């Protein structure tokens, strides 16, 4: 529909035609302009629809979509929150000639739900802003464009938007994935008391997509993350899972799908460093250097070795060296190191042994950096951190956009 809008006369005070003065004038009148344009367009469509035999809307009570009369074109005000702030519009009211029911049609014409304070169109945009940058930065940047974002509105939008996003495995992508966790700053706690857990699925054309997200204690919470994925995971014949987390929940589907567990070789030496510290081994001492270097060596795998016999011999040697390392730790009475290495020993070379890509780089590690860039700004409630991360990762990795 072609619409012509009469803007009337604008009157304003301005001391000089400097650019900054003009920008300020525009800031002041843009709110009036938005309301005026919205109202004019809605009214034009309403009048057009009312002249149609069959309307694109129907009576809320009786379902009639033909017989209506106008009650008012200047009803009481209704507020619509847009990304440019609140726009105040006059209600348009019509009456059903069949059952006499009166109804407002502004929200119907805007295709937004009745009585929702913030329409979902706005929720999506404000929520994404809140996931991409801190509330302070969002507020600062938008204020430079003449509108001030209310922090709480952005916050609430982010929570609402997150509820509409669900992660799952994609049956059309690779049958492998990596899981990892990162500590997050929680309101009222000094230490990073909770861990955000991310599960990524490898994509066939390279890169990753987010398949699961959860939050919980350091040693738990994986059940909640994997539970919604079980149904899809069962559709794979075999799935390679690279993780250091607890995966006991997957036992329930083991008869449906072969799950190959692979210790994350990228994380192993880093976690080992932590156990060396726990066992009181002095950082950078001769023993410390020897043990860590040995483990780094064992964990680095050349993915370009195609010859099966070479591969099998390589793994044999690495396993032998791994046992030597455990013996070395044991001789030094590094008991925590011994336990840690022994627990990991069964799942070290699953990927290579099954001729799967068991590269020692961590894709999920990169994802974690994307998480931390937002999460490290400020303190969070566990749910708030989860929601912000959900939207952020959906945007960066799963093609979510507004
Ligand atoms: Zn009716």
Image (spheres, rainbow, N blue to C red):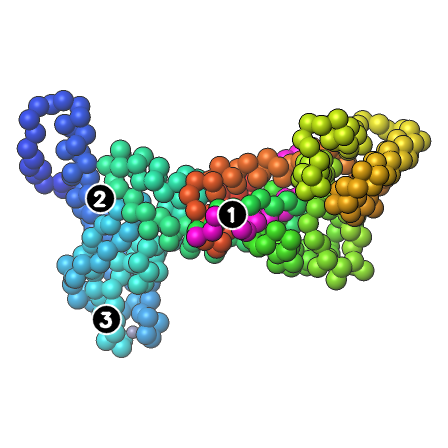
> Which residue position holds label 3?
102
Q: CA distance from mark 1 to mark 2?
A: 47 Å
Task: Mark 2 or mark 3: name the one nearer the start of the chain.
Answer: 2
Relative to 292, say whether 112 is above or below.
below
Density class for disc 3 (Cα within 10 Å; few <14, some 14-19, many ≥20) is some
Disc 1 residue: CB within 8 Å of ligand 1: no
Q: Which label sits in the foreground, 3 or 1?
A: 1
Residues at badges 2 and 3 in contact (C-beta under 8 Å)?
Answer: no
Residue at point 35%, 48% (across, down): 154
Q: CA distance from mark 2 to mark 3?
A: 27 Å
The residue beneath circle 1 is 191
* Depth order, front residue of 334/260: 334
Over which residues does the magenta segment extend? 188-207
Q: Quadrant of residue 128?
A: top left
Task: State which quadrant residue 28 falls in.
Answer: top left
Q: Is residue 186 left or right of residue 3?
A: right
């Amino acid at each position: 529909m072609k619409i012509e809008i009469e803007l009337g006369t604008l009157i304003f005070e301005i001391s000089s035609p400097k650019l900054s003065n003009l920008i300020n004038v525009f800031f002041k009148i843009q709110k009036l302009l938005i309301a005026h344009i919205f109202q004019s367009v809605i009214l034009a469509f309403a009048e057009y629809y009312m002249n149609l035999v069959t309307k694109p809307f129907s009576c809320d009570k009786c379902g009639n979509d033909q017989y209506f009369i106008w009650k008012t074109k200047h009803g009481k005000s209704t507020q619509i929150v847009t990304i440019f702030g609140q726009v105040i519009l006059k209600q348009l009211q019509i009456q059903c000639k069949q059952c006499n029911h009166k109804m407002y049609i502004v929200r119907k014409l805007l295709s937004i739900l009745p009585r929702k304070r913030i329409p979902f169109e706005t929720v999506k945009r404000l929520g994404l802003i809140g996931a991409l940058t801190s509330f302070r930065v969002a507020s600062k940047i938008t204020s430079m464009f003449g509108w001030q974002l209310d922090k709480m509105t952005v916050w609430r939008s982010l929570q609402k938007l997150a509820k509409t996003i669900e992660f799952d495995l994609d049956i059309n992508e690779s049958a492998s994935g990596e899981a990892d966790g990162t500590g997050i700053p929680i309101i009222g706690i000094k230490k990073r008391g909770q861990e955000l857990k991310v599960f990524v699925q490898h994509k066939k054309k390279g890169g990753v997509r987010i398949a699961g997200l959860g939050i919980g204690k350091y040693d738990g919470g994986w059940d909640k993350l994997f539970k919604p994925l079980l149904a899809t995971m069962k559709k794979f014949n075999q799935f390679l899972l690279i993780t250091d987390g607890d995966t006991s929940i997957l036992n329930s589907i083991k008869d449906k799908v072969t799950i190959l567990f692979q210790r994350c070789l990228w994380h192993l030496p880093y976690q080992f460093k932590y156990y060396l510290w726990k066992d009181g081994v002095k950082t950078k001492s001769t023993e410390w250097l020897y043990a860590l270097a040995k483990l780094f060596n064992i964990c680095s795998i050349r993915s370009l070795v195609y010859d099966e016999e070479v591969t099998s011999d390589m793994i044999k040697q690495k396993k032998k060296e791994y046992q030597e390392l455990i013996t070395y730790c044991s001789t030094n009475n590094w008991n925590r190191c011994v336990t840690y290495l022994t627990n990991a020993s069964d799942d070290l070379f699953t990927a290579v042994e099954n001729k799967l890509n068991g590269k020692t780089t961590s894709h999920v590690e990169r994802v974690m950096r994307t998480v931390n860039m937002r999460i490290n700004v400020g303190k969070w409630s566990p749910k708030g951190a989860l929601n912000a991360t959900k939207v952020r990762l959906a945007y960066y990795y799963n093609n979510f956009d507004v």
